[in-house]
Every structure is written in C-alpha cells, then in structure tokens.
Amino acid sequence: MILNEVIPLGDHQLFVETQDGIEGVFDLKPYLKSEAFLPLKDEEEFSSVHNGGYFVEWPCGADLSADTIQARMRSASPAIAQQARKPDRQLATQALVLSRYSQRGRDTWPSLSFSSHSVLGWPSW
C-alpha cells in the first residue's frame, strides 16, 4: 500500500488517503506512551509529519509503516476529509512548521509543498 496524502489533524490524529482511494483517520495517541514517540506529544513536532509513501516519519526519528497505518486507521467521513483538505488548515500547518525551524535558528528553510493533494515536504538541509 502507498500513502498518497497524510495531513495532521488535531488531537494527534492523521488524515490518510491511500493510492487505492481509501480515506481514513489514524490515531497516534496509543503510541505516545512509547519512548520513540514521546517528542510527538508536542503539536509542532507532530505537525511536521513527512509522507514517504510506504511510511510516515517525523524529524525526531519516529516512524510508522503504511501497513501499520492501514491496519489501524478508521474510515473518515466526507466531512473529515473536506476539513482536512481546507487550504487554511494547510497554511496554518505551514506557518507552524516554519515557526519551528525559525526558532531553532536554521539557516535553510525546509522545502514545503502545499496543495489540495500534498503534504508537508521534508526539510532538505
């Protein structure tokens, strides 16, 4: 399975669309007890998720396979899918990530791509 779209939602949930057109919501909260996922309790860190197609990962090193996400996601209502794809949500996420890198004093900004069918781009240092 390939992940086409991954969008962070509130309450440590990810909106996911697969290459097969299946849409769902993956709840990360059960994973936050694990040491590898502790940094994702921070909303800014959680929002910097990167879609690798066959996996998702975060700058802190936490990652999940697409198969794990598919096995544990629940179906998304059309309203959730529409809300996740709102341009203002994506712009807010972009501002959050840029703020995070600015606070860390990075000289190079991450490469970000936002459209109705894209997710956060991974920083290229």
Image (cartoon, rainbow, N blue to C red):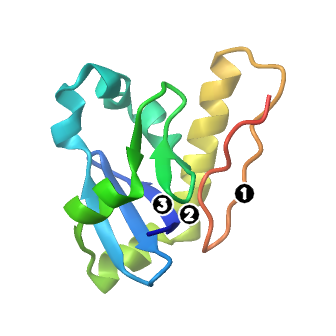
Residue 36 on image: x %, y %? 33, 23
Residue annotated with mark 1:
113
| Mark 1 neighbour class, 10 Å CA radius: few under 14, some 14 to 19, many 20 or more | few
Q: Is residue 69 above or below residue 117?
A: above
Mark 1 or 3, which is nearer the eye? Answer: 3
Residues marked 1 and 3 touching at CB (< 8 Å): no
Q: Quadrant of the N terminus?
A: bottom left
Do the residues under discs 1 and 2 have CB atoms within 8 angstroms? Answer: no
**Residue found at x 38% / y 64%:** 15
In this rendering, position of residue 92 left or right of residue 122:
left
Mark 2, secondary structure of its residue: helix
Labels 3 and 2: the sequence-earlier one: 3
Residue 42 location, quadrant: top left
Snapshot quadrant of residue 100: top right
Residue designated by label 2? 88
Query: For the residues carrying marks 3 and 2, which lies nearer the camera in this image?
Result: 3
Q: Nearer the viewer, residue 106 or 31?
A: 31
Categorize mark 3 by other alpha carbons within 10 Å: few (<14), some (14-19), many (20+): many
The kind of residue on which mark 3 rests is: Val
Q: Is residue 35 left or right of residue 39?
A: left
- Indicate which disc, 1 or 3, sits on the residue closer to the N terminus: 3
Label 1 amino acid?
Ser
Q: Which residue bears the numbered disc 3?
A: 6
Q: What distance separates the C-alpha of mark 3 from that of mark 2?
A: 16 Å
* Image coordinates for residue 5, horizontal then vertical, percent: 52, 67
* Quadrant where the image shows the C terminus: top right
Q: Residue at x 30, y 23 (%)?
A: 38
Name the element at disc 1: loop
Real-space Cα separation, disc 1 to disc 3, in angstroms: 13 Å
Residue 72: image location, x then y, percent:
21, 60
